[in-house]
Amino acid sequence: MYTRISGFVYAALFCLIFCLIAQPASAEVAGSLIIVGHGPEQRMMESLAHAFEKANPRAYVDVMWDDNSKPIDMVKTNQAKIAVAGTTEAGLRSLQIAWDGITIMVHRSNFTKEVTKQEVAELFSGKFKMWADLGGPDTKVLLIDRPRNQNNRDAFEQQLGIAGKIPEGTKVIAKDEKVIKTIAGTLPPHSAVAYVSLGQALEAVASGVPVRLLPVDKVEPETPTVKDGRYPLRRPVLLLSNNDPDPLVEAFEQFALSDDGQKIISESYTPLTKTSSP
């Protein structure tokens, strides 16, 4: 009896030691990963990269952000591993990691109650010259647009069907922070309006900046309404990469979708709805 027990213990110890040796650090990845983009997602991606590096000490992530770059082309030519985008691209695999609500922001003194999606399209197409036409103050509409290469502009134009219809000469501002400051600082006889990412917009409202967000189709722009699709203006935040298997890319994608990654994402964007396991 003693011999048989000893043999069983010996086998169990051998199996345990073998498993530990065979799987030293399988969860940890190593190498260099370049992520590129030119939209409003820079802060979020830098936070994700920092946390991913902390969890994987042998991995290095370089987030390269340039308003004049062409992220998708950089991935296709292997100058980068991941491009952050708002639409899919033929020949590249895409993974959604968040939603971005596109809010309509005006000065706090602009008492326009709400707008429909159609009115937003007409507003940014230049149809309305005075806010009074939308039930607001007797002030002139001052449109603020975003650069042509930004993800939020592409989605905004496509969803409203106004590509190429925003009036020539409309003021163009790249950074959400500067857009918000411009709206807050524009006084009568003009009332400025712009479209801004939900996270930045809610942060500005919460911090007391004199701006407000217009409900669209009677739905308030909020994280729950963006997440479940009730708010009609939203776009996906996508990670685009080549189809060839890459352990480092896949590890970063899994991290972005993990609880820790989604918590970081929720600081700036709307995280994805969790799906129950089968």
Image (spheres, helix red, strand yellow):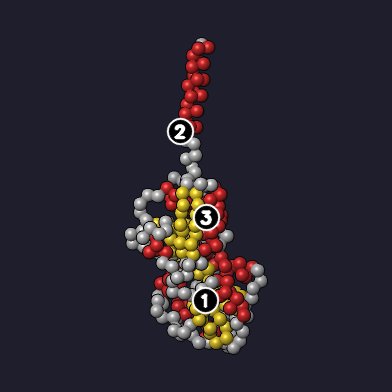
Q: Which mark is residue 201?
A: none
Looking at the image, which is closer to me, 40 or 188?
A: 40
Question: Against 87, is 50 above or below?
Answer: above
Residue at 48% in and 62% down: 64
Sequence-wise, the earlier of marks 3 and 2 is 2
Residue flagged by tag 3: what amino acid is it? Ala
Residue 173 on image: x %, y %: 52, 76
Secondary element at image label 3: helix
Q: Quadrant of the C terminus?
A: top left
Q: Distance from label 3 to label 2 (Cα)? A: 29 Å
Q: Picture coordinates of residue 44 (x, y %)?
A: 54, 60
Distance between the alpha carbons at the discs numbered 2 and 1: 54 Å
Give me the disc on residue 49: 3
The amino acid pointed to by label 1 is Ile
Mark 2, Cα crowd under 10 Å, few <14 / some 14-19 / many 20+, is: few
Q: Which residue is mark 2?
A: 22
Q: Is residue 236 visible?
A: no
| Image-quadrant location for residue 164 | bottom left
Kind of residue sitting beneath label 2? Ala
Q: Which residue does the image show at 35% across and 52% down from the upper left?
A: 244
As drawn, which residue projects farthest toward the right? Answer: 208
Question: Where on the picture, by quarter, is residue 85?
Answer: bottom left
Task: Tell me if I can see residue 149 in this picture.
Answer: yes
- Picture residue at 57% right of the left edge, 86% below the top: 190
Q: How much space separates mark 1 and mark 3, taking CA atoms?
A: 27 Å
Above-or-below relation of 179 to 191: above
Q: Is residue 51 above or below residue 199?
A: above
Viewer-proximal residue, 162 or 75? 75
Reading the image, the residue beneath label 1 is 173
